[in-house]
Image: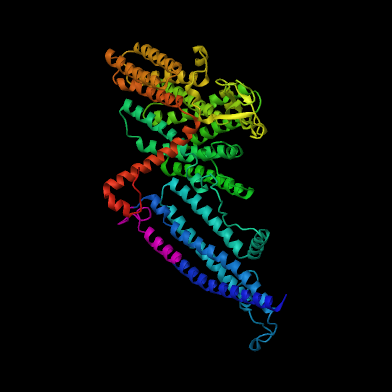
């Protein structure tokens, strides 16, 4: 090393050491402040909780059990933050001692007033006293005494509060504070007794990444993936439409029974089912299909689990998703304990995960595609039965009653219809419409499936029912070969709006049409029962109208005619009940049938690309509407002064 390089190295070492010492002083001040806040909060909470009605009977302060149980969270957060600062302090101590050793190599003579002690030895001397592994015995005893005192006081306060609250709150306190205290103790041990190992492990991990950076790389082009935080908060925005199923059934049930008192219970179970349990289920599905999703033609619109561009990004996303799955399920159980709804929430978790396990096991099969596909079609509809059961049961209609069974069957087949129509549209996204350029007079546009569709036999089987497919490889699409000309992307085709064959018999045997016909028939039965019939003979009329109209809609190829027939059949269902005075509430007869049939008709006119663009398009329209309303409210001048452009 040259003299100039040695001088430059010495300057860097001195600057690094000085910055570390300054940082240590700031950290010591922050550590003292946080600890003082924690101890003060602990004392205030202890004094305040002693005045509550849970712990004092005369002249007491009334407070909710959950509020009282959550009071120690403040000092817990402060103690946790103090421990985090302590962990950083331990790492800094080892690093500063390493810097001191390097600096002493430049100045070998000891300090004249300290005998053989050399310069840059402050941290080493201090550690001979304060180290919890080899420091002074009295200092180590005092440090451990402080830790034990804090644990005793904090644990005693939690136990004291727990003696006065309800049992379910006690369980929640035990799980929450027990887990947090355990983690706090583990971190404290890692930063003290195991401090050397902690620093060595951290240094090894840092050295292994030498030459690389953990900073985010700014791509020249957008990746097309959503952020991981956005995904974890709401994995499937496009599935929000399914959130409407349970409320619609609950409102229909309460309309029929006239009892709306159970709406708070319904809201809790509905939100737990949809946001915690089902979103965890969707995350699991995305984890298992992450490889397929990254190669999907509509991966940007589908917005599934973002896995990044390398193994490290993939590991981060997958492990984060697994943690959030666990947190969602734990949160569902916690809500159940807090609200006294633990039993139904555990049933919901078991049902959803049980259906999910069956679905994933069937989807993983690659043999007997037709048989496996039929089993998947049946399994996928069961989740909609769970949603229907909540609406009926809490709406005042037992899930095992005749009307609820009819509604649950209709929802199961509706779910099958919904999924089948989405899947056949998805299958088109793996296809290309091509024509052979080397064959003169060839005007036929043929559908070619790409290699990825072979990995999804349950949706490939559906598309084969409406379109013959030819195989094509990536090499054959090479423009240099010039054999094929791309006519259209399959995902832009409204394949469901095209008549498959002139024979109506073949139309009615399509799986989604069968599921729709069954669902519409049972919707007619459920609507009839919800409407409080005066005469059971009208049930036959309702079934005939509902099923016949469903078959009629399935056979119509023109979209505008289909919607016209839908309105006509709805009016017929309502009018027949009103004219014959056979039911008390004629509108309820047609309502379930109308919702199912409207969903069917809307899918018949969709392409897969339009279907996946529906949610972003809705958000954009809402944004534009909000802009127009804001401009109308504050005026054009103020609107422009905020930097907004006039919305189109």
Q: How is the image coloured?
A: rainbow
| Residue 378 position within the rendered picture, expressed as x and y whole percent measured from the top left | 54, 24
* Closer to us: 635 or 340: 635
Q: Is residue 399 visible?
A: no
Q: In which quadrant will I find the C terminus?
A: top left
Q: Residue at x 53, y 28 (%)?
A: 423
Quarter of the figure with residue 392: top left
**Left or right side of 338 for 191:** right
Q: Closest to the observer: 61 or 221?
A: 221
Residue 497 drawn above or below residue 303: above
Displayed quadrant of residue 389 = top left
152 or 252, nearer to the observer: 252
Measured from the top left, where is residue 422 in percent x and y?
A: 50, 29
Q: Is residue 606 above or below residue 171?
A: above
Residue 179 horizontal side relative to residue 252, left or right: right
Task: Locate the N terminus and report the quarter of the image it occupies.
Answer: bottom right
Q: Position of residue 328 (x, y in %)?
A: 50, 43
Q: Residue at x 40, y 41 (%)?
A: 620
Instruction: Say above or below: 322 vs 411.
Output: below
Q: Which residues are magenta?
A: 37-62
Res. 467 image quadrant: top right
Q: Residue at x 30, y 16 (%)?
A: 575
What is the x, y in percent for residue 384? Answer: 47, 29
Residue 56 lies in the magenta stretch: yes
Q: Is residue 338 in sight in this rendering?
A: yes
| Residue that extends furthest to the right in the rendered view of this protein | 1
Residue 278 is one of the magenta-drawn residues: no
Q: Is residue 438 left or right of residue 570?
A: right
Q: Is residue 338 left or right of residue 443?
A: left
């Amino acid at each position: 090393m040259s003299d100039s390089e040695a001088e430059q190295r010495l300057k860097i070492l001195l600057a690094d050491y000085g910055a570390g010492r300054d940082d240590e002083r700031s950290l010591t001040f922050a550590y003292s402040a946080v600890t003082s806040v924690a101890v003060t909060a602990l004392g205030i909470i202890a004094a305040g909780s002693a005045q509550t009605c849970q712990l004092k009977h005369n002249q007491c302060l009334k407070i909710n059990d959950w509020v009282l149980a959550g009071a120690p969270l403040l000092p817990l957060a402060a103690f946790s933050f103090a421990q985090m600062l302590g962990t950083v302090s331990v790492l800094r101590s080892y690093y500063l001692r390493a810097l001191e050793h390097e600096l002493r190599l430049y100045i070998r003579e000891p300090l004249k007033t300290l005998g053989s002690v050399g310069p840059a030895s402050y941290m080493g001397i201090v550690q001979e006293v304060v180290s919890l592994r080899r420091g002074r015995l009295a200092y180590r005893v005092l440090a451990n005494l402080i830790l034990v005192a804090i644990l005793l006081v904090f644990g005693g306060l939690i136990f004291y509060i727990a003696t006065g609250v309800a049992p379910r709150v006690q369980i929640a306190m035990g799980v929450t504070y027990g887990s947090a205290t355990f983690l706090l103790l583990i971190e404290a041990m890692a930063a003290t007794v195991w401090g050397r190992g902690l620093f060595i492990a951290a240094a090894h991990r840092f050295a292994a990444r030498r030459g690389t950076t953990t900073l985010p790389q700014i791509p020249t082009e957008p990746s097309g993936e959503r952020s991981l935080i956005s995904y974890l908060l709401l994995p499937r925005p496009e599935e929000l439409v399914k959130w409407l199923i349970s409320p619609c059934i609950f409102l229909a049930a309460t309309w029929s029974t006239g009892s709306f008192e159970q709406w708070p219970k319904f809201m809790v179970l509905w939100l737990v089912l949809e946001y915690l349990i089902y979103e965890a289920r969707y995350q699991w599905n995305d984890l298992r299909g992450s490889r397929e999703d990254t190669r999907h033609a509509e991966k940007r619109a589908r917005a599934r689990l973002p896995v990044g561009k390398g193994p490290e990004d993939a590991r981060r996303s997958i492990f984060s998703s697994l943690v959030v799955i666990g947190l969602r399920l734990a949160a569902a159980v916690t809500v159940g304990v807090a609200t006294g709804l633990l039993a139904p929430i555990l049933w919901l978790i078991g049902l959803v995960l049980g259906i999910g396990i069956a679905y994933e096991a069937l989807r993983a099969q690659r043999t007997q595609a037709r048989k496996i596909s039929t089993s998947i079609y049946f399994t996928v509809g069961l989740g909609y039965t769970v949603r229907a059961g909540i609406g009926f049961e809490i709406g005042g209609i037992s899930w095992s009653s005749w009307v609820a069974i009819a509604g649950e069957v209709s929802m199961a087949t509706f779910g099958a219809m919904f999924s089948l129509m989405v899947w056949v549209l998805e299958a088109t996204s793996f296809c290309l419409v091509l024509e052979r350029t080397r064959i003169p007079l060839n005007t036929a546009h043929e559908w070619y499936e790409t290699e990825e569709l072979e990995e999804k036999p349950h949706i490939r089987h559906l598309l084969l029912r409406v379109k013959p497919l030819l195989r094509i490889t990536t090499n054959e699409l090479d423009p240099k070969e010039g054999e094929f000309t791309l006519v259209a992307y399959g995902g832009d085709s409204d394949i469901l709006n095209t008549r498959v064959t002139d024979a109506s018999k073949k139309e009615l045997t399509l799986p989604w049409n069968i599921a729709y016909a069954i669902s519409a028939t049972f919707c007619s039965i459920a609507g009839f029962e919800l409407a409080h019939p005066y005469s059971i003979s009208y049930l036959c009329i309702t079934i005939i109208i509902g099923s016949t109209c469903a078959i009629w809609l399935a056979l119509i190829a023109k979209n505008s005619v289909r919607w016209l027939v839908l309105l006509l059949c709805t009016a017929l269902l309502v009018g027949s009940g009103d004219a014959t005075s056979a039911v008390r509430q004629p509108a309820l007869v047609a309502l379930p049938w109308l919702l199912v049939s409207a969903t069917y008709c809307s899918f018949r006119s969709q392409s897969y690309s339009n279907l996946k663009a529906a949610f972003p398009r809705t958000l954009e329209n809402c944004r534009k509407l909000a802009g127009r309303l804001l401009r109308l409210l504050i005026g054009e001048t103020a609107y422009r002064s905020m930097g907004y452009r006039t919305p189109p």
